[in-house]
Structure formats: structure tokens, C-alpha cells
Amino acid sequence: MRTLMLGAAALLSACVSVNANVTTTPDAALIAVQNARVRECPAARQQANAQSEGFGAQIGVLGEDVALTPLADPTRAVRLRRLTIQPGGVIAWHDHSAVQGMALIVSGELVERRNTCLDALTYRAGDIAREDVSTAHSWRNETDEIAVVLVAHVVTR
């Protein structure tokens, strides 16, 4: 019995702690959400009908529905979509007269032309674009990195 106990003790003493290679590098998506902030055209640069066209036809954009949540009004719901915009990708000029919501840039960078701003705006991870009833705009990814955007809209069912 004593030999068995000594053998077990010897085996256990040979155990070493295992490094699971757990990284503590913050997740880019989490950082974007934690630092989320609305990005708007500076007041001095706002003007009605400042822009009326975007970056061209839609190209290099993949839109995927993530979730649909019904509202108290049975004809409406909140839709969450993930947009993946490739380098050089364009979201064509469109308006939000029928569908309003907001877009959170999760990763990457996008340039927006908006009907109410004299200048193109650059959005980075953590920036939010409000899309109200008077919004018309277009987006382009002018970088070499993929951009990912979460878009939440109130839609009709």
C-alpha cells in the first residue's frame, strides 16, 4: 500500500500546469460596441440637399438577416442585419423614407455621402449612423480591409 501511495505521489508531482494559450487581446467587435457613439455631420457643414448621388451602383456587399423581433404593432418588427462590405464595395444611394433605424460600424472603415452634409463623412468601428425618415445616402469602403456593419431597422412585416 505504501508503495502504491508513493508511486501516486511521484506521478502527481510530475504534473505541470498547462498554459491554455488564452489571450487577453480585446475583441474588436466588443470594443466597437463599448465605444459606440453617434457620428454626425458638423452643424456648420449641414445643408438640405447637399448631396444627391452616391458612389455608383451597389457592388461587393453581402447582407444577412440576423434576427427579426416583432413589435406591439403586429405589422412592424425590428430587423437586425449584418452587412459585409468588401474593399472597394459600394452601398448604392438609397433613402430611408420607408425604413428607419441605425447602423453601427463593427469593424473597418466606410465613407458616407449624405443628403444633408456638404462633406463626405468617414465612419470607423464604434461609429453609429442614424437613418431617419429624411436620410438619403451612399457608402463606400475605400480601404483594403473588409468592413462589417450591424444595421437595425424598423420594418413592416
Image (cartoon, rainbow, N blue to C red):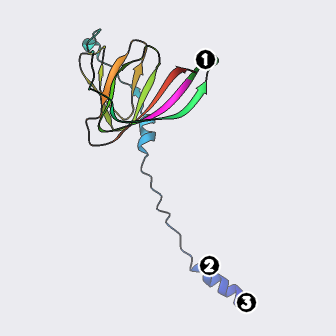
Residue 50 placed where, x, y %?
26, 12
- The image quadrant where one finds the N terminus is bottom right
Task: Kindly identify the amino acid type of the residue bearing the numbered disc 2.
Answer: Leu
- Residue at 56%, 80% in the rendered image: 14
Q: Is residue 55 magenta?
A: no
Image quarter for residue 73?
A: top right
Q: Residue under circle 2?
A: 12
| Three-letter amino acid code at the position of disc 1 | Thr
Q: Which residue is mark 1?
A: 75
Asked whether disc 3 touches disc 2, contact meaning CB atoms under 8 Å apart, the reply is: no
Residue 77 locus on image (x, y percent): 58, 22
Q: Secondary structure at mark 3?
A: helix
Q: Is residue 9 above or below residue 130?
A: below
Element on which disc 2 rests: helix
Instruction: Give left or right: position of 17 versus 46.
Output: right
Discs 2/1, front: 1
Residue 113 lies left or right of residue 65; in this view the side is left
